[in-house]
Amino acid sequence: MLSTNGTAYWAVRLHAPVYAAAPADFYQQVAIRPSPTYDGLHYCVDDWHTILLALIYTVDDTYMRQQAAADASLTNIVFILDGQAIQDTTRTAFIRFLNPEFFGADEAWSCQIGKIFAPGTLTVGTHQLTAYIIDPVFGDFETSITFYVDAAGTGACL
């Protein structure tokens, strides 16, 4: 999950319009991203989850991949879950993003920063997730969501 957003996920989405035996929103069952699309979503306590954000850079003749990679290496994301900083996050490799058209570009590169949580690690109830993006090149940014973890046999666990 942490390493597939810009590659395998888009390969499936772009080339297989029907997902046999899998819901179309499969990432919203696993990924928890502090972005408006994910605000208010419910997750199952029995599932694996990944709290993450992607850094996606569109490139062209004036802003090349090498500069984007250098800029990405200077950017940090700090996740705060229920008032506590998430420790030991992982940064994926800087790789080609397979759907640059999503951003109106011909070429894009990305990496993700996040952490994977085993079933039961996120407790049942309401959670507040904030991400602070510390970016010395493009400026700092903050984003927050509220999400819910449902007990086994209820809500998202049905």
Image: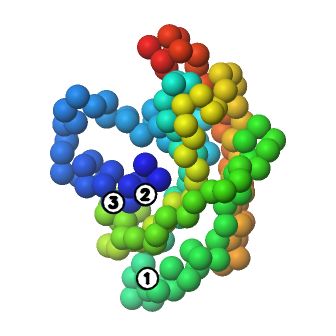
Q: Amino acid at mark 2?
A: Ser
Residue lying farthest to the right in this orientation: 83
Residue that label 1 marks:
65
- Tag 1, which secondary structure? helix
- Against 101, residue 26 (above or below) is above
Please tell me whether residue 119 is drawn above or below residue 81 in the rendered image. above
Name the mark nearer the viewer: 1 or 3: 3
The amino acid sitting under disc 1 is Arg
Are the residues tagged 3 and 2 within 8 Å (C-beta)? yes
Quadrant of the rendered image containing residue 151: top right
Give me the residue at 42% from left, 40% from top: 27
Disc number for residue 7? 3
Q: Residue at image x 37%, y 35%?
A: 25
- Residue type, label 3: Thr
Residue 86 can be seen in this image: yes
**Seen in the image, is 43 located left or right of residue 9?**
right
> What residue did someone put label 2 on?
3
Can residue 101 be seen in this snapshot? no
